[in-house]
């Protein structure tokens, strides 16, 4: 039998715990040949807090764990009897359906991209209205003209004395209106 990807429903907030428990149980019962990867799909997120750049992890699908496995009675029971697992997603309770390879590849590539290039927690778009909350232009309103995610900076058009003036600001200096 070939290994397929299955989605396991876990208690929210316990995804990493379930992932570790599953890996431990697979090792304990000697089923390493029937299980592949077990992972919680996450990406790195960058946010500015107290003027400092902080990285944190964000789950794509809170409450779910991806498991690559061969489905048979023994592996089904091993997963279902793991603490804090509510069951499989898709198919029937007794015979879960795997996700398609295309869906699995899309999730895996998103996980890979998320660790290579952390995304900012707040996303800005050109044309969006923002309020400046810090710096010499505090309490001014403006419109986003350009966004540079690599440097976490924005080009904002601010009205000064009735004239639109472009100003470069950090993400932490503005908030969405």
Image: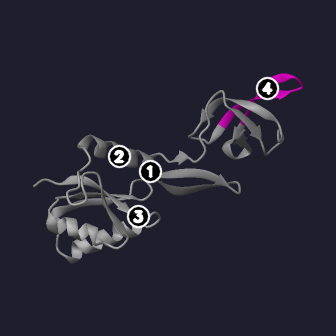
Q: Nearer the viewer, residue 87 or 65?
A: 87
* Disc with the residue nearer the chain's start (4 vs 3): 3
At mark 2, the secondary structure is: helix
Whole-percent x and y of residue 135?
A: 80, 44
Whole-percent x and y of residue 175?
A: 71, 43
* Disc with the residue nearer the chain's start (1 vs 4): 1
Whole-percent x and y of residue 8?
A: 32, 59
* Disc with the residue nearer the chain's start (2 vs 4): 2
Give the magenta range.
154-168
Q: Which residue is mark 1?
A: 60
Structural distance between the alpha carbons of marks 4 and 3: 48 Å
Q: Which residue is mark 3?
A: 15
At mark 3, the secondary structure is: helix
Quadrant in which the N terminus appears: bottom left
* Most distant residue in the bottom direction: 28
* Disc with the residue nearer the chain's start (2 vs 1): 1
Is residue 7 shown in magenta? Answer: no
Residue 72, label in figure:
none
Q: Residues within 10 Å of mark 3 (few under 14, many from 20)?
A: many
Q: Main secondary structure of the magenta part?
A: strand
Q: Which residue is mark 2?
A: 107
Q: Which residue is mark 4?
A: 165
Q: Residue at x 61, y 32 (%)?
A: 125
Q: Are marks 2 and 4 in contact (CB under 8 Å)?
A: no
Q: Residue at x 35, y 46 (%)?
A: 107
Structural distance between the alpha carbons of marks 1 and 4: 38 Å
Whole-percent x and y of residue 63?
A: 42, 59
């Amino acid at each position: 039998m070939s290994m397929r990807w299955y989605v396991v429903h876990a208690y929210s907030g316990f995804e990493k715990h379930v992932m570790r428990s599953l890996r431990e149980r697979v090792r304990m019962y000697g089923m390493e040949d029937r299980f592949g990867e077990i992972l919680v799909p996450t990406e790195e997120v960058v946010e500015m807090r107290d003027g400092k750049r902080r990285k944190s992890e964000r789950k794509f699908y809170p409450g779910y764990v991806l498991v690559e496995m061969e489905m048979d009675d023994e592996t089904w029971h091993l997963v279902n009897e793991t603490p804090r697992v509510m069951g499989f997603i898709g198919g029937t309770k007794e015979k879960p359906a795997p996700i398609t390879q295309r869906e699995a590849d899309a999730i895996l590539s998103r996980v890979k991209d998320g660790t290579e290039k952390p995304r900012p927690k707040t996303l800005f778009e050109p044309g969006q209205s923002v309020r400046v909350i810090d710096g010499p232009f505090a309490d001014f309103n403006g419109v986003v003209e350009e966004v540079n995610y690599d440097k976490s900076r924005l080009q904002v058009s601010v009205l000064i004395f009735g004239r639109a003036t472009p100003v470069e600001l950090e993400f932490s200096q503005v908030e969405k209106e």
